[in-house]
Amino acid sequence: MASRPPPHFVVRRHDAAGNRLWLVLWLVSLLLTAVLVGLLSRRVVPAVVDQRQQRAMRAQLDGLQQQVANLQRAAQVNGVATRLLRGTLMQREEEISGLRADLGFYSRLVGGDTPQGLKVQEVKLQPIAGSRGWNVTLSLTQNAKRDEETRGVATVSVDGLRGNQVVQLEWSALGDTAQRDGLPFQLMYFQQLHGTIVLPADFRPTRLRIHLQPAGDTPVTRTVAWADALSGNITTTLGDHDVQP
């Protein structure tokens, strides 16, 4: 039996330096990975936070815009309601003014047990377009319990300013030639008189003086501010409060 040759063993020295190098490289790679992860996490986390903040700000902005829209609609509704209310109040004030005038008129006709004489109940002015003329309406009353007819003539004069001077224009300088002697009246209870006056171009009126001359009786005079005569709202139920001379 033939004998086998003995095995060959190769003995090599252990390279410890190479192993240490690989270990160092592995540690360096771990360190670089950790640094890269850290850097990426620093970028990603703020980006996520920024997106959340942006969504929150958008939601807040949308809420504020909705509140503004609601307030604008409410303001529009309040504006419309306010205009309607003002219109209603003005209409009611006009109705109340008319009712007061009617009350004063009828109270004058039927009120009290003592007969009362002739009175200027209302004075109204209306401009004539394109001229210096004015239409004048006088409402005359006397108490129904007087039970007798009154006749006479009514005239109107106007106080005002011409330049720097206070002047008074009499009826003869204002009235129509057909009404030179005044506006005749004849009434038992109530009558309206209509006349026309023409003012000079350089004259600024301030008030009217109405003069009633009943036949065989004491004259009646009433002074009314020009602005009040324009509005036609000079009737009172508690007595006269006209402009005094």
Image: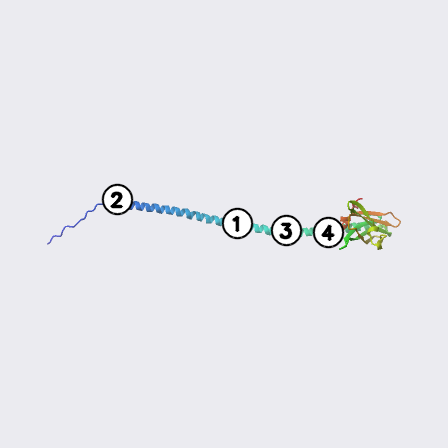
Mark 2 or 3 closer to N-term? 2
- Front position among marks 2 and 3: 2
Mark 4 or 3 closer to N-term? 3
How far apart are the alpha carbons under marks 2 and 3? Answer: 92 Å
- Badge 4 amino acid: Glu
Circle 1: is it few (<14), some (14-19), or many (20+) Cα within 10 Å? few
Between residues 145 and 11, which one lies in front from this camera angle? 11
x 54%, y 49%: residue: 64
How far apart are the alpha carbons under marks 1 and 3? Answer: 27 Å
Q: Which disc, if any, is residue 94?
A: 4
| Residue 129, horizontal then vertical, whole percent | 75, 55
**Residue where numbered disc 3 is placed:** 79
- Front position among marks 1 and 4: 1
| Residue 215, horizontal then vertical, whole percent | 88, 50
- Badge 3 amino acid: Gly
| Residue 212, horizontal then vertical, whole percent | 84, 49
**Residue where numbered disc 2 is placed:** 17
